[in-house]
Image (cartoon, rainbow, N blue to C red):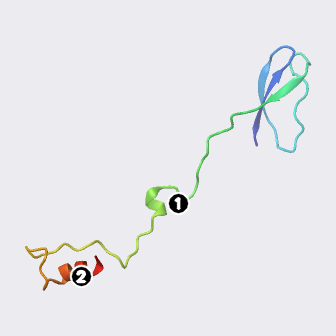
Amino acid sequence: MPTYEYECKTCGYYYEKNQTMSENPDTQCPQCGGLVKRLISGGTGVIFKGSGFYVTDSKKTNPASGPAKKCETTSTSNASCSCCSAAKETA
């Protein structure tokens, strides 16, 4: 249920009232009986609920593509090494 803010045009009395959206707005001041105007509210902050709002939730890792293997040979340009030759083919 939203909270609406009102201010009296006559006496300046300020108050807040919880009302349903379908309920008619107040027109009379509860203190002096003068006319009131409903103020435009700044609203509330946005609250995200559920998954998918964090970096870790939104990124799906592909289980088929594991971490890159490090070349185990001392020379990174060894043509006989399977990891070095595979890296050359994809580049």
Question: Residue 37's spot in the image, x, y percent?
Answer: 85, 26
Q: Amino acid at mark 1?
A: Gly
Which image quadrant: the C terminus? bottom left
Q: How many marks?
A: 2
Secondary structure beneath dot 2 equals helix
Disc 1 crowd rating (10 Å Cα; few below 14, some 14-19, many 20+) is few
User: Residue 80, percent across and down?
Assistant: 13, 86
**Which disc, if any, is residue 52?**
1
Q: Residue at x 9, y 74 (%)?
A: 75
Q: What residue is rendered at 91% in x and 28% in y?
A: 27
Find residue 67 and report its horizontal and vertical position in percent: 29, 71
Residue at 77%, 21% in the rendered image: 14
Q: Nearer the viewer, residue 33 or 85?
A: 85
User: Which circle, 2 or 1, is nearer the viewer?
Assistant: 2
Q: CA–CA distance between discs 2 and 1?
A: 35 Å
Q: Quadrant of the N terminus?
A: top right
Q: Position of residue 44 (x, y in %)?
A: 65, 39
Q: Which element is circle 1 on?
A: loop
Q: What kind of residue is marked 2?
A: Ala
Residue identified by numbered label 2: 86
Mark 2 in CB contact with mark 1 (< 8 angstroms): no
**Quadrant of the image occupied by residue 78:** bottom left
Image: 4 above or below 1: above
Q: Is residue 18 above or below residue 28?
A: below
For residue 1, side relative to residue 67 (left or right): right
- Relative to 49, say whether 68 is above or below: below
Which residue, as the protein is rendered here, is positioned at the far top?
11
Tell which circle, 2 or 1, labels the residue nearer the N-terminal end. Answer: 1
